[in-house]
Each structure stands twice: as structure tokens, then as C-alpha cells.
Image (cartoon, rainbow, N blue to C red):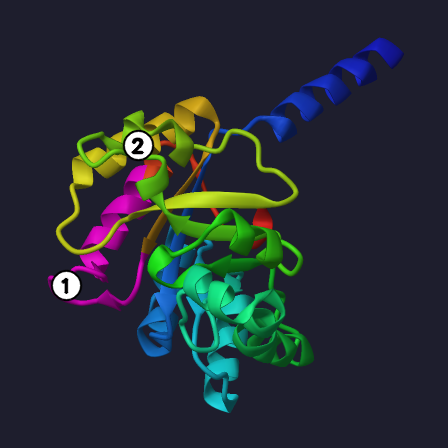
Amino acid sequence: MKRFLMLLASMFCSSSSASEGTLCLTFDDRYFENWEKMIPLFKKYDARVTFFVFQQLDDKSIASMKALQSAGHTIGLHGQNHLRASDYLQQHGPMTYLKNEIMPQLEICRKNGIKIRAFAYPFSQRSSETDKELFTVFDFLRTNCTDVKKKEMKLAEADGCFVKKVGRKQLFYGFPASGNFNMEEVKTAIKRAAEDNAVLVFYAHDITENQVPSHHISISQLEELLKYAKSLKISICGLNEL
């Protein structure tokens, strides 16, 4: 009997620790109305995503952030004034940057029970110095993939975009899943993330009905990604869940 119970425990641990990769979809700025409309679609595919919010937070935006968080999604920050972090920090220093760009949003979120662990760089402008300062406040930072992916390189070949072990403090290099992006290139990368048991991050902005400008993603494009990831049994979750 004891040996049987030990076998069951071993099987449970193996299955619970097993993973088939993680897809993190992130959306920037403050398209709250359309984001909230997508809650049923995300629920359909058991997907949780991350919304990075910028500008001053008023009662209306706080209500939307709470609704998205209640639906299981991650809320992150994108800067009070959407400043280029490296430029501003060089000109004014780290303390002024944190005081003016980060703390106003963060303090409001804390007062309203919105859990914040992640920050997305405006314009993806960053440096090792900005990383160091922001990691004093956040666990996860997101920039774009240009530092680790050459222009002619396929996403699935860009090793730096695939995080196999998430650190206590982690910088993610996101890829733009927006506009007329190459769906097959993105799917191939998602497949690699599943096979490598790695975290792969994408970003867009608004989610719209029709074909979209370069920074946004259409509902049909989004659902195609969700459906494909679901077929691979890859986890689709927000950054707070990592």
C-alpha cells in the first residue's frame, strides 16, 4: 500500500510540474472599452493576458482595470507620461524618473487593490541602467525584440525571445503581433515555445473588429492565435502568473 501511494504521489508531481510552454499576450496603452469586450473571448480559450496602462489613472480607468483583473488578467504599468525611459533618466536622474513616471500610477493601483508586478517600456527604449532602477519596483520588464533578433531573422530562430527559466527579476523581449504580421512566422514561434517549454511574449495595442493599423490586432487575428495555442495545449497566461 505504501509503495502504491508513493507511486501515485510521483505521478501527481510529474504531471503537475509538467509544462508545455507559456504564451504571454500583452496589450499597451488604454483601450479599455475594447479590452473589456474581449473578456468572453479570452475565457473561451482559457486565456489570461496582460494589459499595460499609461497616463493618469482616473476613476473610470481604475474601474476597467479592476474588471480586467477580476476576470483573471494581469495589469501592468506603461508610464504616467509614456516617456522614453533612458533619455529621461539620463537627463533627470533615477529618483526623478521613478517619482514622476512610476510612483503616481503605482500608488493609485496599490490603494485600489490592483496588483502590479510588471512594466512595459514606452517605445521599448531602455538601458541596463533603466532596468536596474525599475527592477527595484517591478519583477518583470518588457521591451521589444530588436536587441536579440536581427531584422532578417525569423522569430523562431531568435533564442533571446524564448525564456526557459523565468528569473525573480526578468526582462522579456516581446514580438509585435499587430498589423499585417506574418501569422505563420508567429505560429512557428509558438510551436517552438511549446516544444522548448519556454515563455514567449507578444505585444499589440487595441483589439478591433476590422483590419487594423500597424500597432493593433484584429479580433479574427487574435482568435486565430488563441485557437492555435490552445491546439498545442500551451498555457496562455498573464505575467503575474509566471
Give the numbered dot on residue 212: 1
Residue ranking furthest to the bottom: 59
Tell me how far mark 2 sits from mark 1, CA to CA: 22 Å
- Mark 2 residue type: Ala
Up-down relation of residue 212 to residue 226 (above or below): below
- Mark 1 residue type: Val
Residue ranking furthest to the top: 3
Magenta segment includes 219: yes
Q: Earlier in the sequence, mark 2 or mark 1?
A: 2
Task: Give the percent coordinates (x, y) of residue 205.
Answer: 30, 64
Magenta segment includes 19: no
Residue ranking furthest to the front: 91
Q: Quadrant of residue 44?
A: bottom left
Task: Give the percent coordinates (x, y) of residue 49.
Answer: 44, 56
Task: Give the percent coordinates (x, y) of residue 45.
Answer: 38, 50
Task: Give the percent coordinates (x, y) of residue 57.
Answer: 50, 83
Q: Residues within 10 Å of mark 2 (few under 14, many from 20)?
A: many
